[in-house]
């Protein structure tokens, strides 16, 4: 399960690799050959030198036209020159290592980023490019905005479309349609996708609306997620109480300590911290050895 909106935009293709082909057709009218087989490739391209190069998702697909590697990269902002060079590196590395063609697919929820990414990405001097990358770019301007339940039959595509349009002012309508579509599939899968959407939307009004669907609607798939959200809310409420208590005593916490408090789900541990905070002179007095 992804942990951030960035991860959600590429992890979804690990759950359903054929979604790449369907998305290219739906968004770009690109007739990519049908996959005969798919394998997820190790995305860590780091060399012996301490230079980290890690692809978000890379798939090796087999079609009737032969093998091909799909490099799938979400991008929230217009790519820097360094990022463009990294993409060149990814494609060159995979082609050299596996001896098969590689294709770059960029996913974004930002129209400006999509427009920038559609421009040819070159290496070399301006007077004459040494290499050029022409990526496929899927963004909010070419991804269908699904508000008709009949269009949401392809659940994976509907999820991807909702994440691509998460900043659309009308996104709530699409989320309502998606929730209705999830109610029509097997409950365990619906719970998974509902959680996936929750992560993929990130913070903001779209997330608040989706949370409202989970917390107030009677969809069967929402029951388990509702319990999880309520438990998360209780944890956050306890954390805020402890933060206020420590602040009143003039005790400052480091970011790791705040993260420790915010993610603690063990009530015994939490109430031990509260007890210690009543007489503590420092953060170490609160989080010392139990």
Image (cartoon, helix red, strand yellow):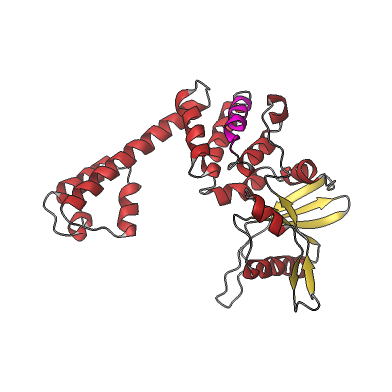
Closer-to-camera residue (136/257)? 136
Picture coordinates of residue 232 (x, y %)? 38, 38
Asked if residue 264 is among those painted magenta in the image, a careful observer would answer no
Q: Would residue 157 be found to the left or right of residue 169 on screen?
A: right
Q: Would residue 219 be found to the left or right of residue 260 on screen?
A: right
Q: Which residue shows up at 29% across the image and 45% down it? A: 239
Residue 179 location, quadrant: top right
- Above or below — where is 63 with respect to 134? above
- Above or below — where is 207 with respect to 223? below
Q: Main secondary structure of the magenta part?
A: helix
Asked if residue 176 is among those painted magenta in the image, a careful observer would answer yes
Q: Which residue shows up at 81% across the image and 63% down it? A: 100
- Above or below — where is 64 with respect to 190? below
Q: Would residue 279 be found to the left or right of residue 52 on screen?
A: left
Closer-to-camera residue (127/259)? 127
Span of residues in magenta: 169-181
Total marks shown come to: 0
Quadrant in which the N terminus is drawn: top right
Residue 288 location, quadrant: bottom left
Q: Name the residue at the right extreme.
A: 65
Picture coordinates of residue 93 (x, y %)? 72, 69
Q: Which residue shows up at 41% across the image and 30% down it? A: 227
Picture coordinates of residue 193 (x, y %)? 58, 36
Picture coordinates of residue 4 (x, y %)? 52, 49
Q: Which residue shows up at 67% across the image and 33% down it? A: 155
């Amino acid at each position: 399960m992804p942990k951030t909106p960035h991860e959600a935009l590429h992890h979804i293709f690990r759950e359903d690799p054929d979604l790449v082909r369907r998305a290219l057709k739906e968004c770009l009218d690109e007739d990519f050959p049908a996959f005969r087989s798919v394998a997820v490739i190790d995305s860590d391209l780091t060399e012996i030198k301490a230079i980290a190069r890690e692809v978000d998702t890379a798939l090796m697909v087999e079609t009737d036209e032969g093998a091909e590697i799909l490099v799938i990269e979400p991008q929230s902002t217009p790519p820097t020159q360094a990022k463009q060079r990294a993409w060149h590196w990814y494609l060159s590395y995979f082609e050299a290592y596996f001896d098969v063609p590689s294709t770059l697919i960029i996913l974004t929820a930002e129209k400006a980023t999509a427009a920038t990414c559609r421009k040819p990405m070159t290496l070399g001097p301006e007077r004459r490019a040494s290499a050029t990358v022409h990526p496929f770019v899927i963004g909010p301007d070419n991804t269908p905005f699904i508000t008709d339940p009949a269009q949401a039959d392809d659940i994976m595509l509907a999820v991807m479309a909702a994440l691509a349009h998460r900043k659309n002012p009308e996104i709530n309508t699409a989320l309502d349609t998606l929730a209705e579509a999830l109610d029509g599939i097997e409950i365990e899968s619906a719970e998974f996708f509902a959680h996936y959407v929750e992560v993929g939307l990130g913070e903001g009004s779209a997330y608040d609306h989706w949370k409202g669907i989970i917390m107030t609607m009677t969809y069967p798939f929402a029951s388990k997620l509702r319990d999880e959200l309520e438990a998360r809310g209780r944890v956050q409420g306890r954390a805020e109480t402890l933060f206020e208590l420590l602040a009143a005593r003039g005790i400052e916490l480091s970011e790791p300590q705040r993260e420790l408090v915010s993610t603690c789900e063990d009530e015994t541990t939490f109430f031990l911290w509260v007890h210690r905070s009543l007489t503590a002179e420092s953060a170490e007095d609160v989080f010392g050895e139990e």
